């Protein structure tokens, strides 16, 4: 009976992990689209005004895009490693999960939040640039 509950726990772990990966991909896609669209919008305004603040916001959006690409790559790398470990045995898989959770720079949710901060900063800087150009 204890073995059945462990198998059920392992199956639930994999299902929840898959659901969280899908949700994270939706979030990354949304952030990537937002940062790309915002950078394009700002780039058209920059050509017209040439304000330094517009360039800074484009840079922030670009950093956000780079962080998101890193996050997608990190997720892919971790998925490949999980599959390898699962092929061997569940204990190796559990060890890998603990290893990933201890290393903050390999936690996608932290990397995704950093990207969100850069998108937010880009928006704030752009709003300041728009306010400054409207006041001139």
Image (cartoon, rainbow, N blue to C red):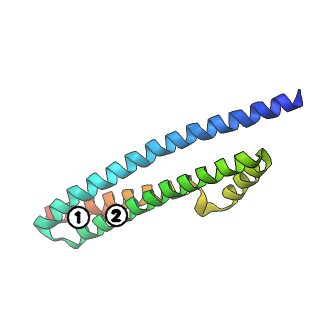
Mark 1: few, some, or many residues within 10 Å (few <14, many ≥20)?
A: many
Instruction: Select label 1 or label 2 by which is in front.
Output: 2
* SS for dot 1: helix
Labels 1 and 2 touching (C-beta < 8 A)? no
* SS for dot 2: helix
Q: CA distance from mark 1 to mark 2?
A: 17 Å
- Left-right relation of 26 to 54: right
> 91 or 43, which lies in front?
91
- Left-right relation of 21 to 62: right
Q: Residue at x 37, y 52 (%)?
A: 32
> 112 or 3, which lies in front?
3
Query: Could you say which quadrant of the image residue 74 lies in?
Result: bottom right
**In this rendering, is residue 9 above or below 21?**
above
User: Residue 129 got which mark?
Assistant: 1
What percent of the width, then of the height, locates residue 90?
77, 45
Mark 2: few, some, or many residues within 10 Å (few <14, many ≥20)?
A: many
Q: Residue at x 29, y 69 (%)?
A: 56
User: Residue 62 got which mark?
Assistant: 2
């Amino acid at each position: 009976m204890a073995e059945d509950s462990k198998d059920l726990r392992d199956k639930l772990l994999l299902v929840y992990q898959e659901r969280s990966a899908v949700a994270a991909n939706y979030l990354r896609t949304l952030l990537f689209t937002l940062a790309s669209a915002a950078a394009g919008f700002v780039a058209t305004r920059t050509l017209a005004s040439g304000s330094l603040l517009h360039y800074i916001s484009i840079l922030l959006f670009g950093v956000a895009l780079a962080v998101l690409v890193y996050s997608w790559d990190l997720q892919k790398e971790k998925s490949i490693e999980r599959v390898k470990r699962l092929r061997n045995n569940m204990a190796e898989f559990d060890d890998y999960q603990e290893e990933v959770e201890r290393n903050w720079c390999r936690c996608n949710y932290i990397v995704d939040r950093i990207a969100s901060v850069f998108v937010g900063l880009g928006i704030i800087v752009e709003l300041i640039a728009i306010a400054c150009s409207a006041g001139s």
